[in-house]
Amino acid sequence: MSEYDVIVIGGGPAGYPAAIRAAQNKLTVACIDAWQNRDGSYAFGGTCLNAGCIPSKALLESSELYHRAQHEFAAHGIKVGNIELDLAAMQKRRATIVKSMTVGIGGLLKAAGAVGLQGHGKLLSGNRVEFTGKDGKKEELKAKQVILAAGSSPTELKSLPFDGKNVVDSWGALEFDAVPKRLGVIGAGVIGLELGSVWRRLGAEVVVLEALDSFLPMADGAISKEALKHYKKLGLDIRLGAKVSGAQPGASGVTLKYTDAKGEQSVEVDKVVVAIGRRPYSQNLLGDDTGVQLDERGFVKVDHDCRTDAPNVWAVGDLVRGPMLAHKGKEEGVMVADLIAGKVAEVNYKVIPSVIYTAPEIAWVGQTEEEVKRSGRAYKIGSFPFSASGRARAMEASAGFCKIVAAVDDDEILGVHIIGPMAGELIAEAVLAMEYAASSEDLQRTIHAHPTLSEALHEAALAADKIAIDFPNR
């Protein structure tokens, strides 16, 4: 029986960083990953690198360039003539990026001194792990500590099961070999909006059916309102309060049936992407008598430091409570690896940024204005539009704004919300500021290079005290 200090089950964005950090901490480590591609080949990286974060961003970037070449380059004085889409080349680029990233993880594990094992890992009692290799052979491993990082999988609609052809999950939507004439997207969350944007920019008519009556309820209200305006301008047909009740497959597509405020409705589409969320992938993860407890939704129960109810067993990432975000899982994995090594470590769950990689991008961290208002704490708002940013105007990307919510009593930054160019990059400054309990005055007194997009955040901080320089104070 092979023995290790730490065995990590899962090689995605929560698992492989945990394994690398544990190895950096001079522990003996094995990282088991069960991810399989369509062709049956194994790859490290989990959903994020193989079928989520990375491939979706590759297509978002390519589709945005295609859209800009059609609609925006002329404003820069660039005449490009007849634009043609080579989807095969675009998809080849996506696949190449994914392969290079996933192969790289194996190299990172090896360089750190961790053993990478491809196959299925199952926790047994007594900190034993049953490993089933690619050849189907089973081997029992032993560990002093076990980290569960098996990730998540797409949630399926009972009334609309995946068929891999006309009804697909988010992975399937990344691999279309032709642009659908009419695409249905069920769910107006982050995944649905990103995938809908990709195929709309490439020429598809896109209908988004969202069961909730409100749009992007997790985001700040002002951001949600602004975002909806831009998605509609792009051509996304977003229908709120639309509850899908069933579907009728046909020779050339699918007829979706749904109900809304007007009653029973239907819409015909060529392809359907179901993007209603994800569920923890705990299938065949736990043997009998492990002591690990699951909640009613299938999440592994953990404390603040990601300890399970079983001694020396931890769980991180999409398997546990909190937002299903790769960077949240990564930091949890690193934290656990450091705690196992006896170091001081924690994750500040109050400052986890969220990003939607559409155009314009959307990013936020901390509390929304609505949440602060409900808390009863007196607050102030600072906002600055990108239309007043010289850099944004030069980029022909002046849509959106930066918004800061700060406390009146001590000027603490409570939340930052951005919709506009490079929002996902700009939010990092806000995260750093909030991690170190900065005030809006601290941002005001921080010199920002000119002309840059980051000046919008600077001006929003000034606007919170009505002393903005580059936009009228109200």
Image: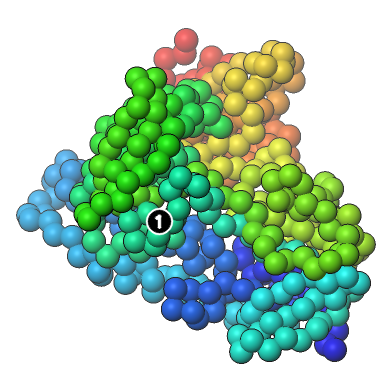
Q: Which residue is mark 1?
A: 168
Residue closest to the eye, 430 or 4:
4
**Residue 457 relative to residue 290: left or right:** left
| Image quarter of residue 393 | top left
Q: Secondary structure at mark 1?
A: strand
Q: Quadrant of the N terminus?
A: bottom right
**Residue 34 relative to residue 298: left or right:** left
| Image quarter of residue 331 | bottom right
Q: Amino acid at mark 1?
A: Val
Q: Position of residue 353 (x, y in %)?
A: 60, 43
Residue drawn at (20%, 65%) of the image: 86
Residue reaching furthest to the left? 81
Residue drawn at (51%, 51%) of the image: 156
Residue drawn at (36%, 44%) of the image: 247
Figure check: 324 above or below 312: above
| Image quarter of residue 410 | top right
Figure check: 360 above or below 308: above
Q: Position of residue 239 (x, y in %)?
A: 36, 30
**Residue 135 relative to residue 392: left or right:** right
Q: Position of residue 458 (x, y in %)?
A: 52, 31
Figure check: 132 above or below 73: below
